[in-house]
Image: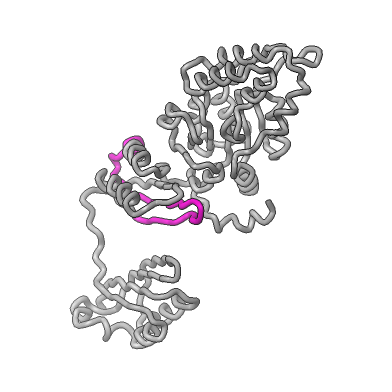
């Protein structure tokens, strides 16, 4: 009866077309069985590892693999300037059952070895192991995705807290998500507007027209930091706008700038079938225009009361506050038949917190400290389209779509 032995064959060298095909053709000459294969290319360098089962005994293999691997393999390796290393395959023995998978996404303009080492050590100290590191983007921003296998007792919240501390220390944005189908199959994104989808606080810009900017800005800052009740703060600010001709709101509207990457993010997600929505503590006058411009599916905001062509200083109907935003997220998901685990919410202020907590993934975008600490993930990058990396999308995967943008 023929004995079988498992080996690990490691191949390194300069990458070129045909390497995998040629090596596998040679291995077929000795009826080697392929059990696993991993390949990575870094710049011009190729590293490939093949887990093989050979029809020889371990004792026979100990005399040297040259007699049991085909001569053609060594010949083509020489011709293609490849290095081969053969060693017995030894299954990794784990100290404890490792049952949970997490996706750890790291974002920064630069991630130096010291920072990656600190992140890796934190993961290791918790008894978890990095199984794979994938680069999602490079250039102006480096995005790395670490697939982490962890012991069942390592809770998501504990891993998140540990890496949040490292994030601040290393100045690398770090997101921790359970690795599951839901992570890659989000179907609804809901965004805050002021200082998230756009680069402004709209009410502050309107206040400038009335000459009460300083008063309104101070109230806005207190409300967004969570030190003032949002509804009361909004009524107080809107009251200061009383008498402003509604036609002058267009002066603000034409000056509003989208956050860098916002248009690209919405375009790509809509191409992927996402439902898109904005929920704002601001005003429908502006959100309706944004909905039309970006072809969004939903837009919700507060309605300013107008009499004789001027603002009265009052808001019509219930104010969209923190509870209102969370409720609207849930209502949209239910209307579209989307699981909450498949929702993504983005915001920067205290009135976004409940919405971020309700979503399958809540992201604090250049947010106030109270929001950064509570959200699933905090982004301190200037571009909104970095959200694509959180759902595992690589730059090259959307290059074709961007030609239509």
Residue 258 at what x, y percent from top left?
Answer: 63, 38
Rendered residue at 41%/67% (across/down): 39
Q: Is residue 157 left or right of residue 278?
A: left
Residue 288 highlighted magenta (yes or no): no
Rendered residue at 61%/42% (across/down): 262
Rendered residue at 50%/48% (across/down): 389
Q: Nearer the viewer, residue 194 or 299?
A: 194
Q: Give the quadrant of residue 170.
A: top left
Residue 184 at what x, y percent from top left?
Answer: 50, 47
- The quadrant of the rendering that contains the N terminus is bottom left
Residue 379 at what x, y percent from top left?
Answer: 47, 39
Q: Give the quadrant of residue 171.
A: top left
**Vertical side of 128 occupied by 234: above or below:** above
Bounds of the magenta span?
131-160
**Vertical side of 370 occupied by 336: above or below:** below
On the question of residue 1 being in view, the answer is: no
């Amino acid at each position: 009866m023929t004995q079988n032995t498992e080996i690990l064959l490691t191949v390194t060298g300069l990458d070129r077309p045909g390497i995998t095909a040629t090596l596998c053709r040679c291995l077929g000459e000795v009826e080697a069985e392929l059990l696993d294969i991993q390949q990575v290319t870094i710049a011009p360098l190729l590293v490939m590892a093949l887990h093989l089962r050979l029809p020889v005994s371990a004792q026979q293999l100990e005399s040297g693999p040259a007699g049991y691997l085909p001569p053609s393999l060594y010949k083509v390796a020489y011709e293609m300037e490849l290095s081969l290393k053969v060693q017995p395959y030894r299954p990794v023995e784990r100290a404890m059952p490792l049952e949970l998978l997490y996706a750890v996404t790291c974002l920064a303009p630069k991630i130096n070895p010291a920072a990656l080492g600190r992140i890796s050590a934190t993961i290791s100290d918790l008894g978890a192991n990095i199984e794979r590191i994938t680069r999602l983007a490079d250039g102006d921003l480096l995005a790395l995705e670490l697939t982490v296998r962890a012991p069942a007792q390592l809770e998501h919240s504990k891993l998140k807290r540990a890496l949040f501390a490292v994030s601040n220390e290393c100045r690398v944005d770090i997101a921790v998500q359970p690795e599951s189908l839901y992570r890659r199959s989000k179907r609804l994104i809901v965004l805050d507007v002021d200082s998230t989808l756009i680069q402004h606080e709209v009410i502050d810009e309107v206040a400038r027209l009335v000459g009460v900017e300083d008063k309104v800005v101070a109230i806005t800052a207190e409300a967004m930091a969570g030190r003032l009740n949002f509804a009361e703060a909004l009524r107080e600010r809107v009251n200061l706008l009383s008498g402003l001709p509604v036609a002058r709101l267009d002066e603000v509207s034409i000056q509003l700038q989208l956050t860098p990457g916002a248009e690209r993010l919405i375009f790509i997600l809509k191409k992927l079938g996402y439902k898109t929505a904005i929920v704002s503590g601001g005003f429908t006058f502006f959100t309706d225009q944004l909905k039309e411009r970006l072809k969004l599916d939903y837009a919700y905001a507060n309605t300013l009361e107008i009499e004789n062509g001027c603002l009265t200083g009052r808001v019509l109907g219930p104010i969209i506050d923190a509870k209102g935003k969370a409720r609207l997220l849930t209502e949209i998901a239910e209307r579209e038949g989307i699981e909450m685990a498949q929702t993504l919410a983005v915001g920067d202020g205290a009135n976004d917190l409940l919405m971020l907590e309700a979503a399958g993934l809540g992201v604090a975008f250049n947010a106030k400290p109270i929001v950064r600490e509570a959200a699933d993930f905090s982004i301190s990058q200037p571009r909104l389209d970095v959200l694509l990396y959180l759902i595992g999308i690589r730059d090259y995967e959307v290059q074709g779509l961007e030609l239509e943008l």
